[in-house]
Structures are given as structure tokens and as C-alpha cells.
């Protein structure tokens, strides 16, 4: 704000969530901890509130206007319409029902893994990778004439960063938040990079995430 000579004009961040708590798919204490953290950072929360419309000047939230010039829309991801359009059996969440080998119900030649499969922890990259390894293992078993394994869902760790050096982590019954959870997230990110890059390239990629991206000509010219 100082660099841009914004003085008497405050910048507000308002977060609108349709459900009564943030992170509604995780246990309530996680959402509450994240809510407290966001409030501490100065974010105003509108819970149980639905965005019903928007113009260049304001957002219509549950029938009331919130003045805003900038809107960042993040209202979730939908499953791929490919499955809806074809003849797959879908769950209430519009995910494909699968058997214990992750084969689509009704068609034993089609395997569905990751976000689109109706498994307890789908919707996470960790689950998508786990599913991929699971079916790869079973393909090898089938090829070698060994018995195949039945799918056993693996609960992933949920690490949610909120602002710099703070995260909330939930792994089974363990919930921690703060700097240690943030460090665990940084470590997990590094580990994920090494899955697809050499150690050296992973280190370069990982350290670049700590650099501030200043694409603004005003900010980058003032040091
Ligand atoms: C903002 C955001 C943050 C996230 N953060 C995390 C996180 O911190 N940790 C975590 O574990 N998970 C996270 N996730 C979830 C994670 O990204 C997904 O669970 C994961 O990518 C699912 O993998 P997938 O292979 O099932 O699907 P995807 O990664 O979506 O891959 C599907 C691919 O199929 C392609 N495709 C679609 N239709 C066709 C077609 N007809 N023919 C050919 N190709 C097609 C798509 O382009 C896409 O590349 C996040 C997701 C989002 C959106």
C-alpha cells in the first residue's frame, strides 16, 4: 500500500462460505481453527452465506450487498462431465461407483481412479497416486497369475496452509496447527517434487516457492 501510495483507503478481504463452517468435509475443529487464524489475519468471514450475484461494484450475498471491486471465485470443483454423459453408475456426489478392484460398476474393463472414483478419500492427490499404484500392482498380479488385492482406502494427511508459516494439519486423530504444521507442509511439498523431478531440480523448484513474485512494475522498481 505504501509503495502504491494507497493511504486512506483500507483493503478488506471478505471470504464467503455457503456452509456453516470452512473446510466442511473435514471435522469441525479444523474449520474452526482455520476460521480463527483467518480472522486474526484480518479476513472477514461470512459463513452460512451464499453468493447469489455479482457486478463490478458489489457482490450479492444472501440478499445483501458487499461492496467489492475484485472477486476471486473458488467455489469448488465438479467431477468430469464425461462420466455423467456416458453410461456409468454414479453416486450422489456424481462420482463413479467402483468395485473392490476400482473397476467401474457394470463394466469390468474400465478402471476409475483418483477424483472421479467413489472411494472414501477421493478428491486428494495423495489418493489419486495411491489408487494408481494399487491398480498397477493388480495389473502385475494379473499378468503373473498371482491373486489380486482388494482395495483398502488409505486416509491421507490434510495439511492446509493459511498465510505464511502457518498451517493446519490433520492426520488420523492428530490435529496440529501453527509453524510446525507449516514446516511439515513444506517438507511434503519437497517430497512431492522429488516424485517427478531429480533431487537437484526438485530443490530448485522447491526453493523458488519461497521467492516473492513481484510482477508489478511499481513494486519491483522500489527497493
Ligand atoms: C486448488 C487445488 C488445490 C489442491 N491441493 C491439494 C493438496 O494440497 N493436496 C492434495 O492431496 N490434493 C490437492 N488437490 C486435489 C488434487 O489436485 C486432485 O485430487 C488430484 O489432482 C486428482 O488427480 P486425478 O488424476 O484424479 O485428476 P486430475 O489431476 O484432475 O487429472 C485428470 C486429467 O484428465 C484430463 N482430462 C479430462 N478429460 C479428458 C478427456 N476426455 N480425455 C483426456 N484427458 C482428459 C484433465 O485435463 C486432467 O489433466 C487440490 C486441488 C485443487 C483444485
Image (cartoon, helix red, strand yellow):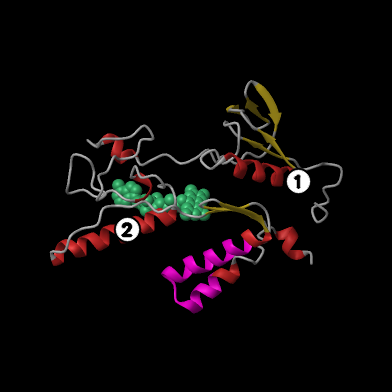
Q: Quick one: which residue is furthest to the left in this view?
A: 145
Task: Judge whether residue 62 is colored magenta.
Answer: no
Q: How many marks?
A: 2
Is residue 200 visible from the viewing direction of this image?
A: yes
Q: Is residue 128 shown above or below 186?
A: above
Q: Position of residue 75 (x, y in %)?
A: 53, 38
Task: Judge whether residue 201 is colored magenta.
Answer: yes
Q: Position of residue 24 (x, y in %)?
A: 54, 38
Residue at 67% in and 53% down: 163
What whole-number distance in Å separates the C-alpha atoms at marks 1 and 2? 40 Å
Q: Position of residue 184 (x, y in %)?
A: 58, 63
The region drawn magenta spans 182-205
Secondary structure found at label 1: helix
108 vs 156, nearest the viewer: 156
160 vs 85, nearest the viewer: 160
- Marking on residue 132: 2
Q: Which residue is mark 1?
A: 40
Q: Position of residue 140 (x, y in %)?
A: 20, 65
First in sequence: mark 1 vs mark 2: 1
Main secondary-structure element of the magenta-colored stretch: helix
Quadrant in which the C terminus appears: bottom right
117 vs 99, nearest the viewer: 99
Q: Residues within 10 Å of mark 2 (few under 14, many from 20)?
A: some
Q: Are marks 1 and 2 in contact (CB under 8 Å)?
A: no
Residue at 65% in and 60% down: 215
Question: Ligand 1 within 8 A of label 2's CB?
Answer: yes
Residue at 65% in and 41% down: 32
Quick check: 165 left or right of 223? left
Amino acid at each position: 500500500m505504501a509503495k502504491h501510495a494507497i493511504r486512506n483507503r483500507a483493503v478488506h478481504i471478505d471470504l464467503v462460505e455457503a456452509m456453516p463452517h470452512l473446510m466442511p468435509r473435514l471435522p469441525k475443529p479444523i474449520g474452526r481453527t482455520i476460521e480463527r487464524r483467518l480472522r486474526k489475519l484480518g479476513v472477514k468471514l461470512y459463513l452460512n452465506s451464499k453468493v447469489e450475484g455479482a457486478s463490478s461494484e458489489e457482490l450479492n450475498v444472501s440478499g445483501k450487498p458487499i461492496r467489492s471491486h475484485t472477486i476471486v471465485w473458488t467455489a469448488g470443483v465438479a467431477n468430469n462431465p464425461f462420466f455423467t454423459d456416458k453410461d456409468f453408475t454414479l453416486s450422489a456426489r456424481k462420482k463413479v461407483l467402483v468395485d473392490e478392484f476400482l473397476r467401474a460398476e457394470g463394466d469390468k474393463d474400465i478402471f476409475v481412479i483418483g477424483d472421479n472414483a467413489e472411494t472414501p478419500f477421493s478428491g486428494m492427490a495423495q489418493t489419486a497416486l495411491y489408487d494408481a499404484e494399487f491398480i498397477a500392482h493388480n495389473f502385475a498380479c494379473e499378468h503373473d497369475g498371482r491373486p489380486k488385492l482388494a482395495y483398502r482406502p488409505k486416509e491421507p494427511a490434510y495439511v492446509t496452509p493459511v498465510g505464511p508459516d502457518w498451517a493446519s494439519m490433520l492426520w488420523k486423530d492428530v490435529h496440529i496447527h501453527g509453524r510446525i504444521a507449516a514446516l511439515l507442509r513444506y517438507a511434503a511439498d519437497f517430497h512431492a517434487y522429488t516424485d517427478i523431478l531429480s533431487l537437484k531440480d526438485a530443490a530448485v523448484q522447491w526453493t523458488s516457492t519461497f521467492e516473492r513474485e513481484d510482477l508489478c512494475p511499481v513494486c519491483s522498481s522500489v527497493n
